[in-house]
Every structure is written in C-alpha cells, then in structure tokens.
Amino acid sequence: MITPFQKPIPVTRPYLPPLDRFRAELETIWENAWLTNNGPTLQRFTTALEKRLGTPHLSLFANGTLALQIALQALQLSGEVITTPFTFVATTHAITQNRLQPVFVDIDPEFYTLDPNRVEAAITPRTSAILAVHVFGHPCRLEELADIASRHQLPLIYDAAHAFGVEVAGRPIGSFGDLSMFSFHATKLCHSVEGGLLTFADPQFKEVFHYLKNFGFRNEVEVVLPGTNAKMNELEALMGLHVLEQLDPLIEERKRIHSWYLEQLTSVPGLRLPPRHSPHVRYNHAYFPIEVEAGSFGMDRDELYHWMRRHNVLVRRYFYPLVPELDCYRDSTRKQELPVSQQVARRILNLPLYNGLTEDEVTRICEMVVAGSASQHNPRLRRAA
Ligand SMILES: *Cc1c(COP(=O)(O)O)cnc(C)c1O
C-alpha cells in the first residue's frame, strides 16, 4: 500500500551550514559594517574558490544569470550565438539581453548536452560564439567543441550552473573553454543564497568584469564601461564560504543517495536512468534525472509526474517545455530540427535529490514509482490512481 508523504518532499533543498559558526562570523561583519563592494568576506570567498578550482582567474557576481550576461557583454559579440534548447531559460535570456540571436541546435540523446556535429552544421558567417551547458552536471563533449570553436575562431562559453565541483581528467570543469559560469543559487549544490561565478582563461577579463558588475566605475570620477549592478554582498559571500567548506562531504552524501536510487530503479522497465559514469570524470551527483518510456513503463511522463505529486513527492520536469517553445522565443529563432530535444523534454523527470534526503525516503519514492507503473497494468489500482 503506497501512502503519500505527510510533508511534501521537494525536488531539492538548500544545505544550511551549522548556525553557531555562521553566527560568530556574522558578528565580524557587524563590527566591520562593510556589507558589499568587494568586502573582506568576498575576498576570502574569492581566495577559497581560487584554491578549490586551481585557477587565479575568477570573478564573483550577484547571480549566475547576470554573470553570464556580463560574460557575453565582455566578449563584444554580434549576430548569432549557437546554444542548446534543453536548458534553464536564463541561458537564453543572457544571449537575448545582449541583443544577440540564439540559434538552438539539437542535443546528444545520452548526455543531453549539445551535439557537436549539429553545432558545426549550424555555423554561418553570422555566428559569433558557442554557448553550451553541462546539463545536470554532465560535461559537454569538450574536445569536439573546443576543436570546432578553434577552427572557426569562435569563443566557447560554458553554462556550468549545474557542474560546480565536477572534474574531467583531473581538471576542474571551469578550466575548459574561454569562460564558464557557475550559479550559487540556493537550489544549487554549492550556494551563497544567490550568487554567480565566472572562471576564465584570459586574465584581461578580470578588470573588465570588475567594471561591468559595478556600473563601469574605474574610480570615483571615471566610468569606463556601461556596466550594471551585479555585485555579490558580504552575507552571501559568508554563506558561500561555509557551504564551500563542506563541499566534499556534501558530494559524498549525494553520491550515496544516487546509488540508492540506482539500486532500486535499475530493473524497472521503461525507465532510463542517468547515463553511465565515465571513469575520467569526477561527478557532483547534483541531480537524478530519469526518462519515462510510456510504452514499457505503463504511464507516460506526465502521468507519473501527477502520480508522484499526488503522493507529495514534488518531482520536476526539467527541462520542459524547451526554451524555443516558450512564448517569448517561439517566433524569434532561426528554425532548426530538434527531434532529440523534443523527445527528451517529453520524457524527462527529475527525482528529489538533496543533502539530508534519507535512505528510507528514497526507498518510499522508488516504491511509489514502481507502484505507479504497476497501477497501469492493474485495473483496480488504475481507478485508485
Ligand atoms: C540556475 C541556472 C542558471 C541561473 O543561475 P542564477 O544564479 O539562478 O541566476 C542558469 N543556467 C542554468 C542551467 C541554471 O540551472
């Protein structure tokens, strides 16, 4: 008998560091009365990130969306940017906010990242950059994209909002491409309540970003660029520091949760579990996306979505609808065929995964999934559903 959870299980839940130590450090901020504008806590967070990521070139922002928008602004692009339809809408907004045109090309059916062959086929003289997304923390096809970008002399930018902590062949994911953006939003694995980060290969960007996130001020009397306000504040930086400190145990815990799901769902017909792990990649285990194949599962994705929600498991359909199918982008783009993205968007469902989710809860969630499938083959249960 499947009973609903009494309290809703969200798809994600922010990690909160122990309050005592946080409070002690708040006192320092109170004493300093320095709340934003490159304060001492922000500088500490910057140094800690440099150490963790092994790169001297990074810049913190108020959020990931503004960070990405500013990255594209700094590159002074024009015309079109090749990107993915299977992402959070902020990826595309960062393009259009810069008065650039997104060109959506299809994704790889296994990892949901941009298909390099289609990227190459979509390049025209108007193409000015490639913006790819490490969806659900799975690295893009890095070598192929780098090769295409360099042959066509196009900047290669990664939306790495899902991928903090991921490493490929011992290299942090942010060291690939020209620029990478990370989001420190509360729903992300590593967070600062709200926050964003750019990592980049060219040290010249450091100064440009410093100006662009602070109205373009060089000093009290000189404004050198049409910047915005995208600074991270001291309270956010403090949260970021405390979460970052716990990153390795947080990833370890998520890895365990991941393996509980795998153990219990592997033999369920009609479910495609997250792709096999490559031995060269250190994953962050931030998400647990599954694909529902209605024919053999017995329910389609939307039926399973409603079934789970009725039982108080707040699963989410990331990413559905696809960005080019949203009202504000429906008419604005150079049309490409997107058969893989469309199929994935119809089938994808993210199960809850966050620090603090217990083995017992995962077991109940998995039993619920299995019962959902079974109910479709059983007329009595079917009525109850
Ligand atoms: C969260 C997210 C963003 C936006 O980051 P914010 O910090 O919330 O502005 C951008 N792209 C992707 C893929 C995301 O998941």
Image (cartoon, rainbow, N blue to C red):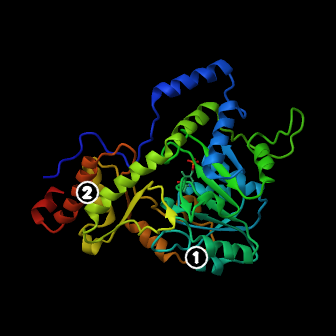
Q: Residue 165 placed where, x, y %?
A: 54, 53
Vertically, is 30 above or below 138? above
- For the point 33% across and 64% down, which residue is it? 301
Q: Residue 308 placed where, x, y %?
A: 28, 54
Q: Residue 123 placed where, x, y %?
A: 69, 77
Q: What kind of element bears circle 1?
A: loop
Question: Where does the C terminus fall, quadrant-wise?
Answer: bottom left
- Residue under circle 2? 366
Q: Residue 338 placed where, x, y %?
A: 52, 75
Give the left or right position of residue 297, taking residue 377 as reference: right
The type of residue carrying mark 2 is Cys
Q: How many labels does the image show?
A: 2
Vertically, is 2 above or below 237? below
**Of 171 and 16, the residue lying toward us:** 171
**Any part of residue 98 in sight:** no
- For the point 65% across and 18% down, which residue is it? 31
Give the left or right position of residue 251, taking residue 262 as reference: right
Disc 2 packing (10 Å; few <14; some 14–19; many ≥20): many
- Residue under circle 1? 336
Mark 1 vs ligand 1: CB under 8 Å?
no
Q: What kind of element bears circle 2?
A: helix
- For the point 31% across and 62% down, which residue is it? 262
